[in-house]
Amino acid sequence: MNEKTELLGMNNDEIEEYLSSIGEPKYRGRQIYKWIYQKNISSFYNMSDIPKNLRVKLDENANISIPRFLKQRVSQDGTRKFLLEMIDKKRIETVVIPQSLEKNTKYSLCISTQVGCPIGCSFCATGTSGFQRNLKSYEIVGQILSSRRELSKRLKNFNSEMITNVVYMGMGEPFLNYDEVIKSIHLLIDYKGINIGQRNITISTAGEVNGINKLAKEALQVTLAISLHASNNHLRNRLIPLNKKYPIEELFKAVDNYIKKTNRRVTFEYIMLDEINTSRTDATNLIKLVKPLLANVNLIPYNEIQGIEFKKPSESKVAQFYEWLEKGGINVVVRGERGSDIEAACGQLSSRKER
Ligand code: SAH
Ligand code: SF4
């Protein structure tokens, strides 16, 4: 028996081509594309405008493998963490974050790009749980389809347009899986398909310079976020081992080039670790680095993780650091902590522990 063809992850042209290759008219491909990405349907038998005999033929020859939902945890603030299973039984997590407490709130999705992460940052639950494999583009967009399906089961008033924002900040380093990530972005932004606004997509990197350089050449309007966390190489080496390969000077050269090429503002993420990177000198050095680039800074009070030594600073220390940056002329926000009670906050995702 031949292996079945995976249709999820294909764009409109690729599905049309596939239909041609099995002797069917191309426009059937367009119909199927809509069923998958607009209507969230993964069973050919539910595609009501496709002739019965073609539905049977497709079912015999093709798959639409939306990741299987295993379970969820719901936070007090409404954030949900979904545990999803891939065909090879590997598990990943996707976090669904309501943007407000209102009934008709829109949602942001935090998606994973790898099972585990090879970078091994010392403060991160994903990084300290090892690396298993890259996700394919169908598994990346599949997180959105799977989440839409689960939300519509659970929320009476849900519709697909309620997911408006996607952040590539779940498990893994997106730029170590560059091609599949870019392919997934093209699927997300297609207005005839999933239809997420480009400007509502953020991709976060630990500083993979190669990926930043490549992204600068794509004609995309997505937001680039850089996990900085330290303003000197000595500390950054300790926190993010990738800094030994791409030290701060090299990273900033790439970011500067990215800004010049794309004319887009970038965001620097700065985890606040008590007694580690929150002093006045740290603030001064951070301002010196970031100010010339007119970049935004997101301060993220550390989410503590069992077994990892770092601690979260007090609220007053966070407020003090914020003030230093603001007075230093930096466009700064403190990122609200969501879902920490269910370990769904940044850096608390891990395929190892669950559960
Ligand atoms: N690998 C990418 C994207 C995933 S991590 C990157 O590192 O940027 C998403 C964000 O969560 C990064 O800024 C990361 O540094 C941060 N993060 C990781 N562990 C965290 C923790 N325990 N508390 C707060 N933020 C954390
Ligand atoms: Fe990987 Fe990002 Fe975690 Fe570092 S912070 S280990 S790059 S997921």
Image: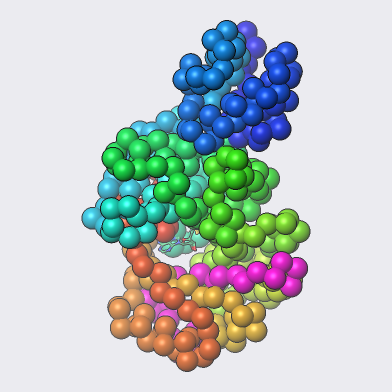
Foreground: 212 or 285?
A: 212
Q: Quadrant of residue 102?
A: bottom left
The boundaries of the magenta stretch are: 260-284
Res. 148 in view = yes
Taking 285 as reference, is 76 left or right?
A: left
Residue 16 screen position, x and y as percent: 70, 26
Which residue appears at 48% of the width and 54% of the height?
165
Foreground: 200 or 267?
A: 200
Foreground: 320 or 263?
A: 263
Residue 73 screen position, x and y as percent: 29, 45
Q: Is 125 placed above or below 29 here?
A: below
Q: How is the image coloured?
A: rainbow
Q: Is 47 placed above or below 214 here?
A: above
Residue 2 screen position, x and y as percent: 65, 12
- The residue at the far bottom in this view is 327
Which residue appears at 38% of the width and 49% of the height?
96
Taking 310 as reference, is 235 left or right?
A: right
Residue 266 screen position, x and y as percent: 60, 70
Question: Is 186 part of what is drawn in magenta?
Answer: no
Image quadrant where one finds the N terminus: top right
Which residue appears at 70% of the width and 15% of the height?
24
Image quadrant where one finds the C terminus: top left
Question: Is 279 part of what is drawn in magenta?
Answer: yes
Q: Quadrant of residue 233?
A: bottom right
Res. 214 in view = no
